[in-house]
Amino acid sequence: MKMGTVFCLEQLKLRRRGIPLLFTAVFLLIALWMEWAFEESDAGTINDQRIMIYLNLLLMTTILVPITLAALASRLCDMEQLGNTYKWICTIEEPGRIYRGKVLTGGIYLTFLSILECAVFEVLSVPAGGASWLRGFQLFFTLFLTGISIFILQLNLSLRFYNQLTPIFISIGGTFAGLFSWFLPNTPLRYVIPWGYYGVLCNAGYIYDEAKRYTTCYWTSYRAGWAAFLLLVALFLYSKGRKSFLWMIRETI
């Protein structure tokens, strides 16, 4: 069975489960927040509104997207977990393709969401002088790489636990830790959890002058080394998750 067919089968399981609606709602919430933040910002108190948009977009993503990916991972697994249908499913498809199909499904949803977020950044940056395609690509790479790492981790957890509330609670805890790490950038916390890499790979910063009430924003070089490290972590999580899934199938059958 081809991967496209496996993806379609995963989509059938998500039918009438509200996943497209959930992703749409999350995107609209991010877009509306970004529009409000841009309208409320004063160009006279900040040197570059584009960087403010960039920072706020990554911060909102840290808050909203991880739990959304956890919900998707849970929905992709709960039917098989509750019904113990792996034995039946594996009669029509090999286990390795089933796992890849779930990862592919998450990757496609995440790709569309990341592209739409980048579009919001590009559109809102136009009045402030426009954003370069390089910044847009760096933003997409950060959103997708961090998101897919979190999704694969959540998928592995959802396949591991019978009660799907456990992975959701882990996601909530990780989200709070990732958000907390934004305000303590010098602590090692953000480097040891995937939720923290929205901040690690953020190649922008700011300095606030309280006396003048003026914010100076600036770009920094992209942290390619940490991006490569996170990519290796994602590949490790994928390999480990696939092996664990195959072992679980053998034990079940």
Image (cartoon, rainbow, N blue to C red):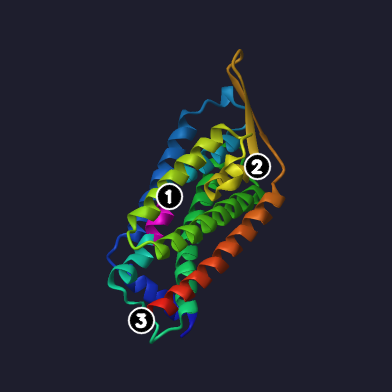
Q: Secondary structure at mark 3?
A: helix
In the rendered image, residue 136, in percent from the top left (x then y), is placed at 61, 50
What is the three-letter code of the residue carrying label 1? Ser
Side (left or right) of 135 relative to 23: right
The stretch of residues the image draws in magenta is 65-73
- Residue 252 to residue 65: above or below: below
Q: Main secondary structure of the magenta part?
A: helix
Q: Quadrant of the C terminus?
A: bottom left
Q: Is residue 170 visible?
A: yes
**Three-letter code for the amino acid on which mark 2 is drawn:** Asn
Which tag, 2 or 3, sits closer to the chain's start?
3
* Marks 2 and 1, the one that precedes in the sequence: 1
Q: Nearer the viewer, residue 182 or 40?
A: 182
- Tell me, yes or no, whether the highlighted magenta stretch contains residue 69: yes
The Cα–Cα distance between marks 2 and 3, rounded to whole angstroms, is 47 Å
Label 3 belongs to which residue?
Answer: 87
Residue bearing mark 2: 203
Mark 1 = which residue? 171
Residue drawn at x 60%, y 20% is 214
Above or below, 88 relative to 100: below
